[in-house]
């Protein structure tokens, strides 16, 4: 745990001296925070140990170099930031990590903002001195990052605000000033229509070609990597699991439970039906602080997931055996049975080192010995040429090999419940690398970036789709991420009407985050409305009541669902629900007053709809207060606004009451009763002549006994809508 050492500026010092004192505090008192003190002066910081990411074996670096410099995976090849700005940048990053530690990504943003400020100083031809920071420099810094996407400039703008606030509070500025980032927060895509939503959906969800290609690879793998990664992909297709979570499953992760059936009254009964199958799930230790739980696999995918888990279990058996040996013998080198006799030798030959490591050539073993400074000598044994053979010290080979075990050994990702010998996805070192020979005595976990590179490809390594010659239907490359399967499963669950709480539990997150994974289009939502039409009890409100009355009272031969379809008309999404008005018959008579219309329906239990109504109710309350104030001031027409707001609020409260009503099933489509209006059907019936008039040869409009044309039929149809 980092020790917080607060920086207390002295009012008697100039801003430049305050900066010097701040730099001295960060360097001398925050010992080994973020990086060891011995490496503090380096231009590039290796901060891998400060940021541990499950399933990720990549190194983490912070480069204190100019913005224009290209960053490499390890040490940067560019020049350092200009002095004295680089010293302040190091102190700021270290101090902020000590006081408010964040993820590597957020720490990188902190440094990126500092690099922008340094570049802005240079672009306006001023020395990069933090105490001379002003609004002109900050605006120039934002200009330098313009055009790098919609989210990154906004994030960096926030970091610049935080930097300015810190400098102001600690008296590091020669002159104080106010500055705010003028970039608006990128809006979330709420509409489910248009190209923007379609592009976002296509980016988040796997395509049909991607699923077909992965299924082909799963059944026809060409390499060991294809066998393992396609199995991991199959698990991701069966349950909404994060990539690092599937990589830290245990060998005994499978769970089976006997299903139950329900009686006529919905009560669970003991025993299972004869044609049922046990429920199958995967025991997961999720990330982001969630508790361990079982993710149940849909029956349709259970056999595939079961086969994938078994494949991983078999393929990784040898690596788990080596891991188990090291766990029992942490100070000894694992040796194959035919080389066990070497354990008693002090000196061994280079070809024997080759056999221990599993290297392809003797020259590779010799290079390994030289590269690791292993002690060697000319021994007593002679070669075929009569010259003494080179021998190396076995104890030093053993020491070096043990140092190459994973840093978190013997527990995968430091989890005490998961030793390497019980991990499902662990392989021999380089066992999944097509260009290197697999080691015999070393192991490694399957890393996230390895899986990501196999799935999506790298600059110098093609993706699995490219290697198999698979493309989209239009010939474009197939692109997919490890998180796309999670988005796809959540979208399917939303489409099938699974409750928000169930989706959140299944996925291992808070229900408030569900909407980020819901990519249903407007047409798919309307298809869900269409499915409700097929259910005799699936709708509530005047539209559905009219359809039921037409069947039950008139005994008409038309099916109920067909009458519902006719009454629903052409549905479309509105701000407060779904409009089922048929515009092919009549324009909207409410002029956009959807809340006061009987043809506005909504899905009970939809959290997004509920949130919109609650938000609009809050706005309506504020508007009501303003209108009442206007009434008290005798402003003409204000009383009408008061009545309008009250009507809207009453309707919104009725909608929220339906959402809270346990008697209405989640997923049912509901429409509320509103004051009756002249419908297109009523208008048509009023103009229609009675059948008897045609028989008697009378003109339309003539009556008998004072009756109006179409009264009897109009009354019958009108009753349906009452």
Image (spheres, rainbow, N blue to C red):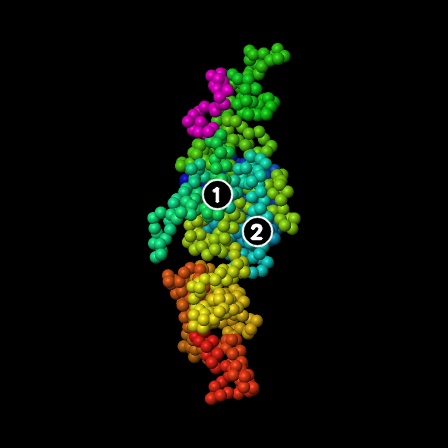
Q: In this view of the protein, which residue sits in the foreground, 162 or 223?
A: 223
Q: Is residue 153 visible?
A: no
Mark 1, secondary structure of its residue: helix
Quadrant in the rendering for residue 353? top right
- Reading the image, the residue beneath label 1 is 303
The main secondary structure of the magenta stretch is helix
Where is the C terminus found, in terms of image quarters?
bottom left
Residue visible at 51% across and 41% down?
A: 232
Residues in magenta?
Answer: 321-345
The residue beneath circle 2 is 203
* Viewer-nearest of discs 1 and 2: 1
- Residue 370: percent from left, percent from top: 57, 23
Residue for point 40% across, 62% down:
664
Dot 2: element: helix
The answer to whether residue 662 of the structure is visible from this angle is yes
Would you say 5 lies left or right of 451 here?
left
Q: Residues within 10 Å of mark 2 (few under 14, many from 20)?
A: some
Image spot of residue 557 (x, y percent): 49, 69
Vertical placement of residue 402 versus 415, above or below: above
Observer-nearest residue: 530 or 102?
530
Based on the picture, tell me whether residue 342 belongs to the magenta stretch. yes
């Amino acid at each position: 745990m980092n020790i917080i050492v607060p920086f207390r500026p002295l009012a008697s010092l100039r801003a430049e001296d305050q900066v010097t004192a701040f730099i001295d505090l960060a360097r001398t008192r925050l010992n080994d925070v973020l990086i060891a003190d011995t490496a503090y002066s380096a231009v590039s910081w290796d901060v891998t140990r400060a940021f541990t990411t499950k399933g990720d074996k990549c190194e983490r670096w912070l480069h204190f170099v100019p913005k224009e410099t290209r960053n490499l995976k390890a040490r940067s090849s560019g020049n350092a930031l200009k002095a004295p700005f680089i010293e302040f940048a190091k102190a700021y990053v270290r101090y902020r990590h000590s006081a408010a530690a964040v993820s590597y990504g957020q720490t990188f943003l902190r440094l990126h903002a500092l690099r922008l400020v340094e570049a802005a100083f240079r672009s306006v031809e001023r020395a990069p001195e933090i105490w001379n920071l002003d609004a002109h420099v900050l605006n120039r810094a934002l200009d330098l990052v313009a055009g790098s996407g919609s989210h990154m400039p906004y994030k960096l703008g926030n970091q610049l605000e935080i930097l300015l606030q810190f400098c102001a509070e600690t008296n590091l500025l020669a002159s104080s000033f106010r500055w705010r980032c003028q970039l608006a927060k990128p809006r979330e895509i709420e509409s489910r229509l248009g190209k923007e939503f379609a592009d976002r959906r296509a980016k988040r969800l796997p395509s049909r070609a991607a699923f077909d290609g992965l299924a082909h690879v799963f059944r026809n793998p060409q390499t060991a990597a294809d066998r393992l990664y396609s199995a991991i992909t199959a698990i991701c297709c069966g349950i909404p699991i994060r990539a690092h979570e599937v990589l830290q499953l245990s060998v005994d992760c499978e769970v089976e439970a006997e299903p139950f059936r329900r009686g006529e009254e919905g009560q669970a009964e003991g025993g299972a039906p004869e044609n049922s199958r046990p429920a199958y799930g995967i025991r997961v230790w999720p990330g982001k602080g969630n508790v361990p739980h079982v993710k149940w696999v849909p029956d349709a995918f259970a056999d595939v997931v079961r086969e994938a888990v078994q494949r991983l279990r078999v393929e990784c058996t040898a690596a788990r055996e080596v891991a188990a040996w090291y766990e029992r013998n942490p100070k000894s080198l694992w040796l194959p049975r035919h080389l066990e006799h070497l354990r008693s030798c002090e000196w061994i030959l280079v070809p024997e080192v080759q056999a221990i490591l599993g290297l392809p050539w003797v020259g590779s073993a010799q290079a390994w010995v030289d590269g690791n400074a292993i002690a060697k000598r000319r021994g007593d044994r002679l070669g075929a040429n009569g010259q003494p053979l080179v021998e190396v010290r076995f104890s030093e080979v053993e020491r070096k090999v043990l140092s190459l075990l994973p840093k978190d050994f013997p527990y995968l990702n430091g989890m005490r419940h998961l030793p390497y010998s019980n991990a499902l996805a662990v392989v021999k070192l380089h066992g999944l690398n097509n260009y290197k020979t697999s080691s015999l005595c070393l192991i490694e976990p399957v890393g996230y970036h390895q899986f990501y590179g196999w799935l999506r490809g790298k600059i110098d390594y093609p993706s699995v789709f490219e290697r198999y010659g698979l493309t989209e239907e239009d010939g474009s490359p197939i692109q997919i991420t490890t998180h796309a399967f999670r988005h796809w499963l959540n979208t399917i669950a939303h489409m099938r009407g699974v409750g928000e709480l169930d989706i959140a539990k299944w996925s291992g997150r808070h229900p408030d985050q569900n909407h980020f994974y819901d990519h249903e289009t407007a047409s798919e939502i309307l298809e869900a409305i269409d499915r409700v039409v097929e259910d005799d009890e699936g709708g509530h409100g005047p539209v559905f009541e009219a359809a039921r009355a037409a069947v039950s009272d008139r005994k008409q031969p038309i099916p109920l669902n067909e009458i519902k379809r006719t009454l629903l008309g052409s549905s479309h999404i509105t701000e407060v629900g779904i409009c089922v008005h048929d515009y092919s018959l009549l324009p909207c008579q409410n002029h956009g007053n959807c809340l006061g219309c009987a043809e506005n329906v909504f899905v009970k239990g939809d959290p997004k709809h509920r949130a919109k109504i609650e938000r609009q109710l809050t706005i309506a309350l504020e508007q009501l207060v303003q209108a009442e104030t206007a009434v008290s001031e005798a402003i003409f027409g204000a009383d009408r606004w008061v009545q309008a707001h009250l009507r809207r609020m009453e309707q919104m409260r009725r909608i929220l009451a339906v959402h809270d009503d346990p008697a209405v099933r989640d997923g049912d489509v509901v429409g509320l009763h509103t004051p009756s209006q002249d419908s297109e059907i009523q208008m048509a019936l009023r103009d229609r002549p009675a059948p008897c008039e045609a028989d008697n040869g009378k003109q339309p409009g003539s009556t008998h006994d004072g009756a109006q044309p179409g009264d009897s039929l109009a009354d019958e149809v009108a009753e349906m809508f009452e």
